[in-house]
Image (spheres, rainbow, N blue to C red):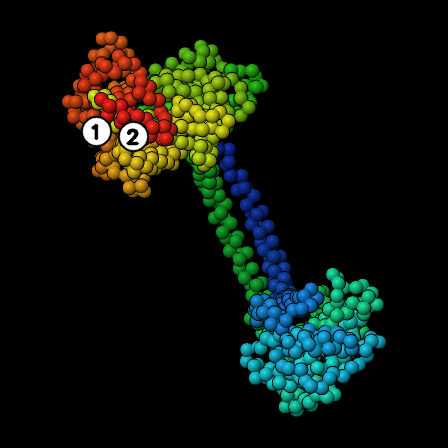
Amino acid sequence: MDLLSRLRRPKARYRRWRPSVQPGAPSPGGEEGIPERRARDGADHLPSQRRGWRVVVAAVLVTGLTASVLSASAWYSYVNSLRHQAVASAVGNVRSILGTSLERDNDLLATVNAVVATHPDVTNRDLSTILARLDLSQDYPGGIAFTYIERVSSAGLAKFEAVTQRDPPLGVAPASSAPIARSFNNQSGYCLTRLVALEFLAGQETIEQMLLTWTAPYLSGRFNFCSSSFEDLLYASAATGKSTVSPIITLLRAAPGLPAIPRTLHAIVAQLPIFIEISPVYTGPRPPTTAQGRAQALAGWTMGVFNATDILDLALANEKDASLELAYAQPGAKPAVLARAGPPQSGALTKDLTLPADPGWVVDVALSPQASGYSPAVQAGAVLLGALAFTVLLVVLLNLLIASRRSALEQVEERTAELRHQALHDALTDLPNRILVDQKARELLSQARGEDLPIAVFFIDLDDFKKVNDTLGHSGGDELLRAVAARLSAAVRAADTVGRLGGDEFVVLSQGSFLADGLDVVAERLLAVLREPFNLEGGAKVHLATSASIGIAAGLRDSPEELLRDADIAMYRAKAQGKNCYVVFEQEMHEVVKRQLVLETELAEAFANQEFFLVYQPIIQLGSGLFKDVEALLRWRHPTRGVLAPAEFIPVLESSDLIIDVGRFVLTEACRQAKAWHDLGHPMGVSVNVAARQLHYDVLIDHVREALGAVGLDPGHLTIEVTESMLMIDSNVTAQRLLALSNLGVRIAIDDFGTGYASLSYLREFPADILKIDRSFVSHLSGTTGTNFLDALIHLGKTLGLLTIAEGIEEGSQLNHLKHQGCDEGQGFLFSKPLPAEEVEQLILRSSSLVGAR
């Protein structure tokens, strides 16, 4: 199990089980039994209301009659007020919708104003493009047209005409006659159309086209708005710096030098609720604050044309029975009606609304209160009768409720106690669960601080419990866990707490006299009771022996979590020391874990930063001396510590899932380098070590196939090395993985052979091609001493028809002995240390030349 990940593997599926508890006896783990608690709680809650039930019934009658009258009166007032509330709600809805719509239109005009003010050279096409992107029909209701009327001096008229010749509003060429000049603000000049953008409304194209035909001369850049019916609006907005609003029908008067308004068009426009809004445009970063400053900075006006029907229809969409009138009041003037919408209302309540954003807008809302159902008096009578009937029924039911109250309370209390117990106890063993263990540990620490008592936690994990599940099934594993719980509970005092944290992990919390004999005596006692064979009764009778590893944490800690954590760390140390033993926590254990956690983090960063690289150790044919293959070995170029030896990081790397990604990198890089040597004329084979965690996942097969296919390397030139000890771990799955690799065409080598104690029958199950004899057997060679086992390993390889490779050859005498015994190949410092790829190539060339010279 990976200590650094701190994750617990699932050990079994658990069924609910409750041990039998004798009346008056404590339940396992020192907890009080549920039956006793139920009996006690029932005695404490005997019903006490029976003697006063008549008083309760009388009080209910009086209260019911009073409540009936008050309810009927309140209902009458409520129904009567619903009408007025409906009107108030509708008015608020109208205010919100219209306020939002008008604010959006004002924002749109302000946007046009800002575009013109900040970009004096904007064209008609640019303005139309900007408005098209704003999606007027969806977000800005009623918008029809937007124009920019530029203030032009007499001296600047020629320049203005040149601009409108190149970029005429609406594409209409200017009229031949010059505009009529007129003094404005005591200055002679013109107010001429510079920009125009139109947005036709659905269903109104014909009418608006007529308006366009008539207004084309006005918008051609020759019509002086300062000498027309628009003059007052322009002057008012220029003087105040604010927008002015007017119905368009009041402005449709013939201007000097322009065609008269057709009667048909005038009659049609009079029926349309169209209004205009004019806003001044100033030069400079912000509008001037004084009248004189505004007169000097005035550049022109933006004018928006809006259809008020579209604005009002948005409010009427939710209030179909309302009648609306939209008006605008200039400062010091009466409101001018812009549009009306909605059916006339008889007996309507009228409300005048103003909008906070612009007090000039005035909305008259007329809405008739709508009655629903019967009259208020009839409804109040029905409420009175219903309330009286309910009061009578309540009195009848009250007797039944009083009679059944005791039974109901007992059931609720019983169920509450059961749920509380379930929340704090393990469903399989009925021992305290992790939550209750944490609470007990907190109480233990608090009491130990106050009374200066010794305390200890014994963290117990069964050894090889997975084999029990695999052999007897989960039901057999569950029965064993229940038996373990019973033995641990019997081995401690009633004051101590035995809990189950999950899986096959148990904990014993103890203090005081139980620890007087010493932690080792208590731990040996717990190990002894667990070593005694268990007789399991489920299915067929089974006689089962087991053992456990115990971690002990003694003394005060800052929190229960630290106490349990330290005991857990000590338990893992006991596992590492061979199981079936106990270890007392020491602070250096925690430091080791912390250093390993830091190393895990650094390894992940190293992989992300591409700090891993490969070196290659040659494998020599002992008979010919030819340099035949290499073994790829991983190295880490640490940013501050330099190149680290494998022993400093490989064990931690192989214990984490990061080995999957790193192993993929090693396979890919080794195959790439082997293919590069092949392309140079050196058909080298390459061996790659595979960790147990890699062999556990099917993805290893995909990674090997991917590495070979990426560079086009012949599978026969790749060897996958697995240690002999890995063959003993889940042999069926291991055999399947190795067979799949062998089917790809790669060779399988059993590394460190001779150290894993694999039997001959095990070796026959695996598709092995190579036996790599561990360096420890080669290093013991000294004359004829220590050669028997090594010779037997070489002979075993030949008997099985496998290639034999000896590792760790460092002396000539070792080489001579191995050659004499017929060992096929070897590697070690006698030939070469692990080298970078470029140095390996040089070694290949030297080896080939030496062999050729012979």
Residue located 84% across and 76% down the image = 186
Distance of label 2 from label 1 (alpha carbons): 12 Å
Q: Whole-percent x and y of residue 535?
A: 26, 23
Q: Is residue 511 left or right of residue 545?
A: right
Q: Which of the 4 image quadrants contains residue 263?
A: bottom right
Q: Whole-percent x and y of residue 618?
A: 30, 25
Q: Secondary structure at mark 1?
A: loop
Q: Which of the 4 image quadrants contains residue 493?
A: top left
Residue located 35% across and 36% down the image = 669
Check disc 1: other Cα within 10 Å, few if <14, some if 14-19, many if 20+: some
Residue 798's label in the rendered image is none
- Give the residue furthest to the left: 799
Closer to viewer: mark 2 or mark 1? 2
Residue 769's label in the rendered image is 1
Residue 399 lies, with reference to residue 705, above or below; the image says below
**Residue under pointer 2:** 687
Q: Whole-percent x and y of residue 701?
A: 29, 38
- The answer to whether one can see residue 568 in this image is no
Residue 822 lies, with reference to residue 234, above or below; the image says above
> Looking at this view, is 733 or 818 the one in front?
818
Residue 277 lies, with reference to residue 524, above or below; the image says below
> Looking at this view, is 82 or 659 the one in front?
659
